[in-house]
Image (cartoon, rainbow, N blue to C red):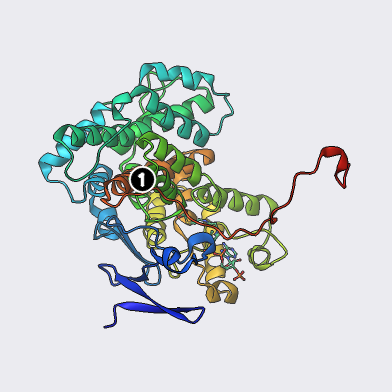
Amino acid sequence: MDRSAKLILEGKEYDLPVMEGTENEKAIDISTLRARTGYVTYDDGFGNTGSCQSEVTYIDGEKGILRYRGYPIEDLAEHATFAETSYLLVFNELPSKQQLSRWSDRLTAYEMIHQDMRHHFEGFPTESHPMAMLSAMINANSCYYPHLMNLNVAPDSSKANKEDFIEAAARIISKVRTIAAFSYKKHVGHPRIYPKPELEYTSNFLHMMFSIPYQDYDAKPEVVNALRQFLILHADHEQNCSTSTVRMVASSGANLFAAVSAGVCALWGHLHGGANQAVIEMLEQILASGETIPGVIAKAKDKNSSFRLMGFGHRVYKNYDPRAKILKKSCDELLNALDLDDPLLAIAKELEEAALKDEYFVERNLYPNVDFYSGIILRAIGIPTNMFTVMFAMGRIPGWVAHYKETQANPKWRIYRPRQIYQGQVLRRYVPIDQRENA
Ligand code: CMC
């Protein structure tokens, strides 16, 4: 097979190497293009750009496949714990019993946040969005762990360097749930509830969220299980907007807390992690207004309206999002177990059915994505809507840590620095203010 692509530019022919991934994904390596031809490539929104080589997560959007380090998401969602999944993402392999036990002990050891950080919480206005508090508090950790500012994650780094990375990874994965729960308590004006070391990751978070002084929250197993699945399904998703942001920041050499904090900010938008909140707001709006499902579908198709069906469509999935499939089942099981009859779920199901039959959605391969059902699950658990994206972030931390490590462990590590096609004004001279046309 010919291992190069030919490019003819201004009558001159160039050979460009072709690359192939382990799952036969093909790419043309253009890394020498500008030096050889003076041209760059243009790819608005990076839809065709492989920005790195990665071993973390594999997606086949056409077939609806998602795997972490080779393991199908369906297997992990059914059998693994979140601690185990985070170990897999960060350290490349599923842990042995002993490795998992040590990793879980680490997560427990680092579950508290520095006592001085309570002053940061106290400084936020009560109405602060929990995502703003989360990103600020994650970055604030940079102030408390100066010895973790310059991690060396190169494969041949010293034992002490490796130990520092494990500490940083465990601290951030563990503390994020404490920060998330404290942000919620701050938002509702309740006293903070400290973590309990005997609880595993998911139950511990639920305890910090929903216990009140002298009354512990009694988490139903179905709730713990639904949250476990939610976190696992959000743990990584290759080069999406927030993960690419984390890698971008990591590429500059910034510390792990700073890079992950930037990832939280990128996740916040309604086209990314903010969509789970937007789905519930859309369903609530439909319920309150009494709009019909055909009316909503028509509005989503109307190019004169900015309205989109939240929780539908995906940049890479042109088939059912495999995460949505698992969450749909999980959602039904949870609502049955809690004996909840959520009118929003009925609207969601009707909407999904109508959209999947509609030519506009069929032609464009627009299927429900992970956010379509996750909002209903979180709502059933009692998580307030403005915390939904925080929950997404909590799940995504192990993936961000894995990508941070991969970026800096790359022997060819260099700063990310895309080019652009400048379309602005050509050279013009400064005009004194009283001589300008608009003077
Ligand atoms: N409702 C109506 N039309 C849509 C929708 C939608 N949800 N999504 C895409 N389209 C249309 C879009 O208008 C365009 O139509 P046309 O070809 O006629 O111009 C076509 O489908 C392709 O859309 P696009 O905007 O080019 O697709 P994209 O890959 O840039 O955007 C997306 C992907 C997820 C941002 C988009 O589908 C969307 O806005 N969905 C709603 C928000 C949402 O649910 N986001 C969560 C994504 S999953 C969680 C995560 O991983 O972050």
Given residues 178 and 373, the one toward you in this image is 178
Quadrant that contains the N terminus: bottom left
Residue 302 on image: x %, y % = 69, 67
Residue in the image at 38% along x and 50% along y: 234
Residue 32 placement, left or right of 287: left
Residue 379 on image: x %, y % = 48, 44
Q: Relative to 187, is 372 above or below?
A: below
| Count of residue discs | 1
Name the image quarter holding residue 205: top left
Given residues 52 and 93, the one toward you in this image is 52
The residue to which callout 1 is attached is 400
Given residues 417 and 207, the one toward you in this image is 417
Residue 251 placement, left or right of 270: left
Name the kind of residue labelled 1 in the image.
Trp
Name the image quarter holding residue 224: top left
Quadrant that contains the C terminus: top right
Residue 425 placement, left or right of 277: right
Q: Relative to 125, is 73 above or below?
A: below
Quarter of image, ligand 1 = bottom right
Residue 368 on image: x %, y % = 48, 62
Label 1 neighbourhood size at 10 Å, few (<14), some (14-19), many (20+)? many
Q: Is residue 213 visible?
A: yes
Residue in the image at 39% along x and 49% along y: 334
Q: Secondary structure at mark 1?
A: helix
